[in-house]
Image: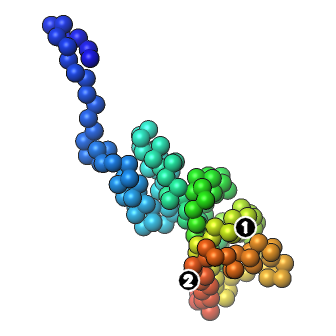
Amino acid sequence: RKKGLGMVPVLQTTKSFGILSLPDELLLNAFKHLAVSSCCPPKTAVIISHVCQRLRRLAILGPSLWTDFSFYAYGVNEMSPALIHACLERSRKLPISIEIFLHNFNVIEEPQEAFEEFMELVLPHTHRWKKFSMELESVFSFETPVSFSELPDAFLDAFRSPTLEILQVIYLEGRTFE
């Protein structure tokens, strides 16, 4: 209680209106739907976390906002190594989804190095993989071939993981973009 102008006690209230008046559980659910519909869900979670302290706390403590990982060998790769680390930590022990897009129109420098770095970060978590999807074009190539016989056992173990629900490999033969 504060004293008003005439020394009469005044109740000080902090009411939230609009979206901030919703309970945490509903906000998290809405943010998860928003994140899933975006091209880079973790980036959406980062944006949400920059709105205010309450949404930052919700976003950082809401593990379901940090479970989708994407790697693009073309265009802007939204998943920096720092963001991947943050996602792996913030998603806690929830199952994660991995999507990889390997196309021929490379814009990022050193796509093979970026891909290998991405895989090095997510491979230790194969026991948590819920979805693994890879889309590649026949005209896409790295400087040196990726040999399946040289893949770490952890990668192959992921396909035997009880958490893996979706395994998808899409091969686009002869598609070109001009």
Q: Amino acid at mark 1?
A: Leu
Which quadrant is home to the N terminus? top left
Residue pushed farthest top?
A: 7
Which quadrant is home to the C terminus? bottom right
Q: Secondary structure at mark 1?
A: helix
Residue under label 2: 178
156 in relation to 16, above or below: below
Q: Position of residue 150 (x, y in %)?
A: 84, 78
Identify the residue at image location x=57%, y=80%: 166
Q: Left or right of 149: which side holds 30?
A: left
Q: Position of residue 169 (x, y in %)?
A: 62, 85
149 in relation to 57, above or below: below
Q: Left or right of 156: which side holds 135?
A: left
Identify the residue at image location x=20%, y=17%: 10
Q: Amino acid at mark 2?
A: Glu
Residue 76 visible here: no
The number of callouts visible is 2
Identify the residue at image location x=50%, y=59%: 64
Label 1: few (<14), some (14–19) or many (≥20) C-alpha neighbours in 10 Å: some
Q: Quadrant of residue 152?
A: bottom right
Residue under label 1: 123
Identify the residue at image location x=64%, y=76%: 162
Q: Position of residue 104 (x, y in %)?
A: 65, 79
Q: Left or right of 120: which side holds 101?
A: left
Residue pushed farthest front?
A: 162
Q: Secondary structure at mark 2?
A: loop
Q: Position of residue 51 (x, y in %)?
A: 41, 43
